[in-house]
Image (cartoon, rainbow, N blue to C red):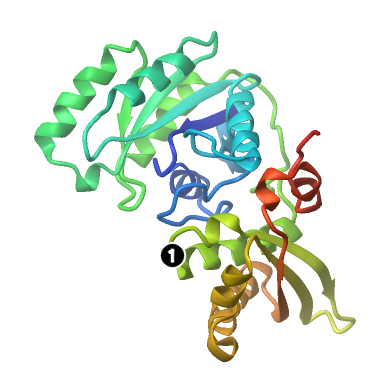
Amino acid sequence: MKSGYVAVIGRANAGKSTLVNVLVGEKVAIVSPKPQTTRDRITGVLTTPTMQAAFVDTPGLYKADNLLNSYMQKTAEESADDVDLIMFVIDAHDGLGETDKALAAKFLSKKIPALIVLTKIDIMPRSLLVSELKDLSELGAEVVPVSARKRKNIKELLKVIENLLPEGDKLFEEDIISDRSEKFMIAEIMREKILLKFEKEVPHGVAVIVNNFALRKDGEVYDISIDIICEKSNHKSILIGKQGAAIKETASYARQDMEKFLGKKVFLTTYVKVKEDWRSRPYLLRENGYGIED
């Protein structure tokens, strides 16, 4: 049997989380069209009769502008140091840039098996795809073009991954699809809905803390209480909306996904709180669930 950890690395918005969800066959990472959606390592596990691949989804690579972003970049970098395979993901439907090639070359230079995945080929002109495949092949790693949204070439990608992974025992029990707890996933579902609902800088300054996550004695309903942390008073007003309309709508969509994920009814309570500049203050980052050192 082949088994191992696969670091999924790439620039922000390259489509890493969507790809991991499709490869695993279940939603293990939240997705949105905004950068910085993934903030920490999330492992999604695929088990087949001949392979177990643990895909480590990482924050997107980009220039850090606060302490939280620096933590995210460090997380992405360190994720590539202790794995069995590096899968560098590139979204090149607008053209392959020098930054993409330089970053790919950097991670391919590690003494770890690696491949390149070119995503979103369903929205790329064929002529551009051909030229970019040629350019990327010069980096010396196998290049697999895919469309996660259309499930195109996913089987071919899995064959390449299995070929590159070492022989080994299973890393997880067969019924495990993620290394993250239900409580963590509940917070991520709420944050995903905020990312999708609100525009501009508001979602990036938001953290979600689950204060209460308890199954009632009847075993049918979860009572969940969540704090939504933002950085500014005007952001709080935007998140709540007129007469609470915005937060009610966001929480309603989140609750629906939570019920699908948990397979039970959810009674959800949300509170919006302000903690100014929390993304650049170590103790607030730790308080909000990020492993920052002073």
Residue, far bottom: 243
227 over 28 or under it: above or below: below
- Residue 227, x across and y down, in percent: 74, 69
The answer to which of 33 and 139 lies nearer the viewer is 33
Helix, strand or loop at disc 1? loop
* Quarter of the view holding residue 93: top left
Question: Image quadrant for the N terminus?
Answer: top right
* Quarter of the view holding residue 158: top left
255 over 151 or under it: above or below: below
Residue, far right: 217
**Residue 4 seen from this side:** no
- Residue 257, x across and y down, in percent: 58, 71
- Residue 209, x across and y down, in percent: 74, 62
- Residue 164, x across and y down, in percent: 48, 19
Q: Mark 1 points at which residue?
A: 199
- The kind of residue on which mark 1 rests is Glu
Question: Image quadrant for the C terminus?
Answer: top right
